[in-house]
Image: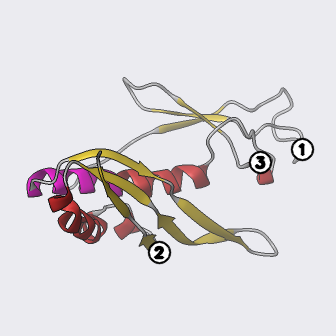
Amino acid sequence: MRRDYQVDVVWTGNTGPGTNSYRGYRRTHEIRSPGKASINASAAPAFRGDPDRYNPEELLVASLSQCHMLWYLQLAADSGVVVIGYHDQARGTLVEEPHGGGRFDEVTLAPQVTVRDRVSVDVAEALHQQAHKLCYIANSVAFPVHCNPTTRVAN
């Protein structure tokens, strides 16, 4: 089965003269999809972007984290593991080339999962490997995605 996804990316950074010079325009833009709130985005600050807006690099790391989490929660529910908290502090490393361009060389997910009971801990930890194998986004990137989870039991 194929599923198509479409978003509109609209540049909002024309300050009047367009792209007449590298410093003469803003990198701000909106990401839109029908029926949803738009996302105010920009380039990363290192690339003359607005630090108050999400940038493509952050959104890539977020997509990997979201995909892993959503698969993980489904697998937990299917396995009888009751997750009551999930917080991932995902990090990605971008390597810039000296003459422009670059690539991510890795992303590390660090989900902190809270489960309801101690019996679930071993199963909860094992589910991360399966979630990683199922994640559409992780299967689509050309760099390693690591997962260093921690699991704790609720009080």
Disc 2 packing (10 Å; few <14; some 14–19; many ≥20) = few
SS at mark 2 in the image: loop
Which residue occupies 10% across, 58% down? Answer: 79
Side (left or right) of 106 relative to 65 = right
Q: CA distance from mark 3 to mark 2?
A: 25 Å
Residue 104's place in the image compared with 43, above or below, is below
Residue marked by disc 2: 142
Residue 1: tell me if it is visible: no
Which residue occupies 42% across, 55% down? Answer: 65
Residue 74's place in the image compared with 29, above or below, is below
Res. 41 image quadrant = top right
Point out the tag, 3 or 2, that comes first from the N-terminus: 3
Residue marked by disc 1: 23
Residue 102: tell me if it is visible: yes
Between label 1 and label 3, give the one nearer the viewer. Answer: 3
Which residue occupies 79% across, 37% down? Answer: 26
Q: Position of residue 68 (x, y in %)?
A: 34, 58
Residue range corresponding to the magenta coloring: 68-79
Disc 3 packing (10 Å; few <14; some 14–19; many ≥20) = few
Q: CA distance from mark 1 to mark 3?
A: 13 Å
Does the CB distance between marks 3 and 2 fall below 8 Å?
no
Residue type of the residue flagged with mark 1: Arg
Between label 3 and label 2, give the one nearer the viewer. Answer: 3
Residue marked by disc 3: 45
Residue type of the residue flagged with mark 3: Pro
Q: Position of residue 7 (x, y in %)?
A: 44, 39
Quadrant of the snapshot with the N terminus:
bottom left
